Image (cartoon, coloured by chain):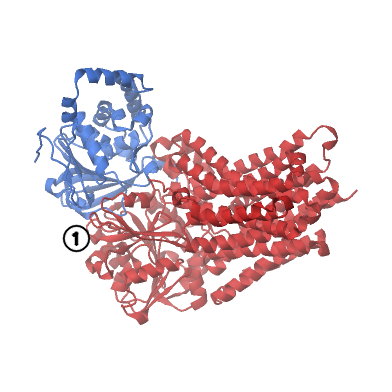
Chain colours: A blue, B red
């Protein structure tokens, strides 16, 4: 399944078929000498905001997860109560500031979407948590993500699933996400670049599918690649307002159940009707 | 020499109004229409600010008036392009406003830079009036007539040229106006040929990049262009905006609204069509046969062809959805395809090879469904409309725009045009929580009741695909067999079916909110439900045709509290933007109006009548625009096209008001206001009574009637302002620019207030309000004249 010098990923292919990507992080690290690294570090520390240490972010991350956890009772599926602890734990482990552009690292742990270039955004943490939670991932699951973006969602999923396959249509984003995930050691995430409409047939079926790009219809090939008993989450909306979620579940007979969800608990708003 | 003055004023006014229209188009392409309207309307505050500046520095400016006027025109020309380029660089992102404080700074900066050319215009006109007080009427006439001609020229140019090129022409107009001002001064005549040459050469000297709009990277067109291997096949201007067709051979587009997730065949490859950067529709990659029947059968709209055998079809919104290709593939008896944009219809007919397919049975017409039905009449088995009532945008990003298709009267007219046993099929994108769906349903129920249907529930059904909602209205009601066919159709495609006659087959989709709403709308509790629902779902009417208004103040606190967990997407920012615009315009206007009063408070320069003058000129500014907006709204219904309605109304109102201002001395203020109020009331009464008859006339005749309808009140509307300025001129000539500025501020506030009034109280309140405002202006001016 995997190839390449790191033994974990395939090389980039420019083709209509999805192509696996590999980050050049290993080659880069080998080429940098210790003196150069010290100079680079010194320069980075002098840059405004660049010298913030991981412990600082760790506190921000804890605060972010706590604020998401406090959103108890606002879950769109009333029976689900609050967001699963495992999901929150995964969020605690992923350094979100590594997935946002440098100029936005100070806002990395705010509950808001951020631009990542190429007309794409990294979803707000609450939405990431919610979509992940709706997938109800088991440790043995194989998950497919359509729309890698910065790779943050895939990183979160990697802490919950056995394997994560993620596909991005924009080559530049796919390449940078692959490099980033590689650098951060997410070995069970496999990034590909290509047209996501047909899904990833060679890796199917999947226990869970997450689509992070709004679509005018649910692509039937994705439904076919969903295992019986599997779950798929698709958001509908605009980049900074991507809040409207659809949950598709496939039962053991292969029948679909489609639920339109919203991260606002709609019940209080329509109460009495 | 006077001719040079009037020509310069007319040219500058033409350029200024053209600039307003061109900037709206440019910002619509870059960011979206709602944002464009907001930014440009507030930038117009610059006109009033220009007048106030002239008041503050009057003596200095008057002493150098000829040179200053020439310079102001040159500055207008330079800033028309410069301010656009600067605003473009600020890269304001409306989508990010609620997340980032920095965006507010960018927005303020955008207002400020765009106000510069309008401030130059406002200062130039008010300075010209101050310098030539005996010619106020004629200057005002030149100003209005020039603006009218500028509006028409801008509309025509934008339908043929790209907005960036039009912006260069606008700048040339400013430079040309400076040549006319310079021509009035003997010692400056040497500069005239230079300025003329500059005006002519400007469009060729500037690099094209200076005026090219930079589309937001979040707009659908920018996203489509990012696909590897994608290419633009066509890009052309049209009256409604820039049309772009994009193909992506390597990673094809697959547009199929509401397609069944169980569809067994592959979605065909398509090209996407964009209007001003927003997705409009799709075309098959090569020809209509690229959309196989098995694929079309997976679409929710196929329910119509399941229930009807080879129906005659009237399809509105030709390129939206895939209705045209569905109708053609089902080889129906006759297909009428409507779209307001003729250019889009041409693209559609070429792509679908309509000319080769049953030429005699396929007809295309560039008009609205209501205008078509009024003119042609007849009965159709199927009336199909895709996303007819509001844009495809989700609730939160939607603006509040008038639309006469989805009013109670609109659906009533459509129901009358359906043959017995036929169907109306209205489809739109999914909304959750349901707002537009329930509003459409409520409107249909009311329209059916008004059409004499005793049990509307038996004639209505809703089909919910995973991403779309389709409302079916049956002429004659659904029978048992129909309902069973609907349920079978839905269950095979994983769609939800909500029949409104008590049956409910909803095996695959959970839509409890929709289900509850449907039940409530068919019960005796309908009105209470509509009034207490968190979103405004009260049906729109022809008097208040704002289907797309969903905002309710009572829901705002709850949505704001939950903005971090999804509430932001449910707040209708388009409505709040209107309120924000009104507040900003009012505050800025009041501050700038009061500024000269504060500066000249001491000494002999205080003007005792300033309060009454402020009232009079505010009333005149508000009244003029109230009537213009009210007429535009009525003409949209009459002509069936907003672009045509705005062009006819703006051109006619301004040109005929200009003529009226020339004749104002003969009639006097009192009689002018009386004539105005009477003609306006009679015209609106006549339009209400004769509306359907007028709508049935040929398009050319309707345009002629529209011009005549605008001309009569406009003639009288042109009189009060110059008469008022003459009163000021007699009492305190130094306050003329200030009075002009007050009128300018009111003109910015007026369209926003008129829209809000129309939304909440109906169009009649706007017309009535305009008459009261003119009466108020008359009383204030009369009290100023009396000793």
Visible residue check, residue B195: yes
Residue B88 image position (x, y, % from top left): 47, 44
Most foreground residue, B471 or B36 = B36
Residue B218 image position (x, y, % from top left): 38, 46
Q: Quadrant of the N terminus of chain B?
A: bottom right
Most foreground residue, B41 or A87 = B41
Residue at 23% in and 39% down: A175
Q: Residue furthest right?
A: B787
Q: Residues within 10 Å of mark 1 (few under 14, many from 20)?
A: few
How many numbered circles are shown?
A: 1
Quarter residue B653 falls in: bottom right
Residue at 13% in and 45% down: A203
Quarter residue A54 falls in: top left
**Marked residue chain, label 1:** B
Residue at 32% in and 51% down: B225
Residue B742 image position (x, y, % from top left): 71, 46
Most foreground residue, B204 or B539 = B204
Quarter residue A139 falls in: top left
- Name the residue that disc number 1 marks: B264
Q: Secondary structure at mark 1?
A: loop
Q: Residue furthest bottom?
A: B360
Visible residue check, residue B522: no
Residue B301 image position (x, y, % from top left): 33, 64
Q: Is residue B742 left or right of residue A17?
A: right
Decide: is B214 above or below B378: above
Q: Is residue B650 left or right of residue B3?
A: left
């Amino acid at each position: 399944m995997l190839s390449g010098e790191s033994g974990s990923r395939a090389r980039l292919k420019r083709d209509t078929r999805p192509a696996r990507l590999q980050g050049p992080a290993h080659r880069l690290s080998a080429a940098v000498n210790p003196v150069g690294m010290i100079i680079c570090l010194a320069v980075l520390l002098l840059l405004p905001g660049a010298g913030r240490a991981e412990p600082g972010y760790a506190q921000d991350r804890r605060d972010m997860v706590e604020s998401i956890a406090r959103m108890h009772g606002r879950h769109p599926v009333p029976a689900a109560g609050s967001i699963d602890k495992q999901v929150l734990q995964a969020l605690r482990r992923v350094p979100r500031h590594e997935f946002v552009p440098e100029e936005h690292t100070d806002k990395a742990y705010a509950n808001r979407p951020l631009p990542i270039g190429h007309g794409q955004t990294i979803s707000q943490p609450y939405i990431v948590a919610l979509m992940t939670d709706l997938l109800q991932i088991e440790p043995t699951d194989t998950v497919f993500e359509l729309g890698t973006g910065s790779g943050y969602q895939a990183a979160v999923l990697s802490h919950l699933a056995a394997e994560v396959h993620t596909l991005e249509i924009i080559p530049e984003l796919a390449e940078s996400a692959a490099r980033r995930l590689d650098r951060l050691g997410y070995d069970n995430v496999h990034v590909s670049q290509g047209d996501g409409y047909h899904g990833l047939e060679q890796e199917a079926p999947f226990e869970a599918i997450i689509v992070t790009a709004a679509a005018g219809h649910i692509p039937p090939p994705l439904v076919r690649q969903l295992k019986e008993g599997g779950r798929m989450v698709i958001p509908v909306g605009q980049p900074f307002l991507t809040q409207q979620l659809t949950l598709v579940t496939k039962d053991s007979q292969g029948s679909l159940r489609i639920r339109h969800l919203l991260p606002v608990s709609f019940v209080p708003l329509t109460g009495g009707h | 020499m006077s001719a040079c003055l009037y020509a310069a004023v007319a040219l500058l006014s033409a350029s200024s109004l053209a600039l307003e229209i061109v900037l709206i188009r440019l910002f619509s392409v870059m960011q979206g229409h709602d944002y464009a309207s907001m930014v440009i309307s507030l930038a117009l505050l610059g006109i009033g600010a220009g007048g106030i500046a002239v008041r503050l520095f009057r003596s200095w400016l008057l002493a150098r008036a000829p040179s200053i006027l020439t310079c102001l025109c040159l500055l207008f020309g330079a800033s028309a392009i410069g301010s656009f380029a600067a605003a473009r660089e600020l890269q304001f992102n409306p989508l990010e406003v609620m997340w980032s404080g920095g965006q507010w700074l960018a927005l303020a900066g955008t207002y400020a830079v765009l106000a510069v050319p309008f401030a130059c215009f406002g200062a130039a006109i008010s300075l010209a009036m101050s310098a030539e007080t005996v010619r106020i009427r004629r200057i005002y006439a030149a100003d209005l007539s020039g603006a009218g001609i500028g509006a028409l020229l801008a509309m025509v140019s934008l339908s043929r040229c790209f907005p960036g090129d039009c912006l260069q022409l606008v700048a040339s107009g400013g430079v040309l106006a400076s040549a006319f001002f310079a021509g009035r001064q003997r010692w400056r005549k040497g500069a005239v040929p230079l300025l003329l040459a500059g005006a002519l050469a400007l469009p060729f000297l500037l690099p094209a990049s200076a005026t090219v709009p930079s589309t937001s990277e979040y707009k659908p067109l920018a996203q489509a262009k990012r696909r590897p291997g994608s290419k633009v096949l066509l890009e052309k201007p049209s009256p409604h905006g820039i049309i772009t067709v994009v193909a992506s051979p390597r990673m094809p587009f697959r547009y199929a609204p509401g397609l069944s997730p169980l569809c067994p065949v592959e979605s065909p490859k398509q090209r996407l069509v964009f209007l001003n950067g927003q997705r409009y529709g799709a075309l098959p990659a090569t020809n209509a046969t690229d959309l196989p029947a098995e694929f079309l059968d997976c679409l929710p709209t196929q329910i119509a062809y399941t229930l009807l055998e080879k129906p005659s079809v009237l399809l509105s919104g030709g390129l939206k959805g895939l209705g045209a290709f569905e109708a053609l593939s089902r080889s129906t008896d006759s297909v009428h395809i409507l779209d307001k944009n003729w250019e889009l219809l041409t693209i559609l007919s070429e792509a679908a090879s309509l000319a080769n397919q049953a030429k005699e049975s396929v007809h295309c017409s560039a008009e609205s469904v209501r205008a078509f039905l009024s003119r042609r009449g007849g009965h159709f088995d199927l009336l199909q409309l895709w996303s007819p009532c509001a844009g495809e945008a989700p609730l939160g990003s939607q603006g509040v725009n008038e639309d006469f298709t989805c009013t109670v009267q609109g659906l009533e007219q459509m129901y009358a045009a359906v043959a017995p046993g036929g169907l109306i099929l209205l489809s739109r994108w999914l909304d959750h929580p349901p707002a537009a769906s329930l509003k459409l349903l409520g409107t249909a129920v009311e329209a059916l009741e008004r059409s004499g249907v005793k049990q509307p529930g038996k004639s209505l059904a809703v089909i919910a695909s995973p991403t779309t909602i389709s409302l079916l209205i049956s002429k004659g009601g659904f029978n048992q067999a129909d309902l069973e066919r609907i349920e079978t159709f839905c269950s095979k495609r994983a769609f939800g079916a909500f029949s409104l006659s008590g049956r409910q087959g909803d095996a695959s989709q959970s839509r409890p909110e929709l289900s509850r709403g449907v039940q409530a709308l068919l019960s005796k509790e309908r009105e209470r439900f509509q009034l207490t629902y968190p979103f405004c779902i009260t049906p729109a009417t022809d008097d208040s045709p704002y289907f797309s208004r969903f905002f309710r103040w009572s829901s705002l606190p709850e949505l704001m509290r939950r903005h971090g967990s999804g509430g932001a997407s449910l707040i209708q920012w388009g409505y709040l933007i209107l309120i924000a615009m009104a507040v900003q315009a009012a505050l800025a206007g009041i501050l700038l109006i009061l500024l000269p009063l504060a500066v000249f408070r001491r000494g002999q320069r205080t003007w005792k009548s300033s309060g009454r003058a402020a009232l009079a000129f505010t009333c005149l500014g508000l009244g003029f625009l109230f009537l213009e907006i009210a007429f535009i709204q009525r003409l949209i219904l009459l002509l069936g096209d907003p672009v045509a309605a705005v062009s006819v109304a703006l051109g006619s109102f301004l040109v005929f008001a200009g003529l009226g201002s020339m004749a104002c001395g003969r009639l006097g203020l009192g009689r002018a206001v009386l004539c105005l109020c009477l003609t306006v009331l009679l015209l609106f009464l006549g339009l209400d009574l004769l509306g359907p008859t007028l709508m049935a006339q040929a398009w050319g005749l309707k345009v002629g009637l529209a011009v005549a309808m605008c001309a009569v009140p406009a003639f009288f509307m042109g009189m009060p302002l110059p008469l008022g300025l003459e009163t000021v001129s007699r009492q305190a000539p130094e306050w003329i620019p200030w009075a002009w500025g007050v009128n300018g501020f009111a003109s910015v506030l007026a369209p926003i207030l008129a829209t809000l009034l129309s939304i909440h109280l109906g169009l009649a309140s706007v017309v009535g309000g305009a008459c009261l405002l003119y009466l108020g202006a008359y009383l204030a001016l009369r009290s100023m004249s009396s000793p």
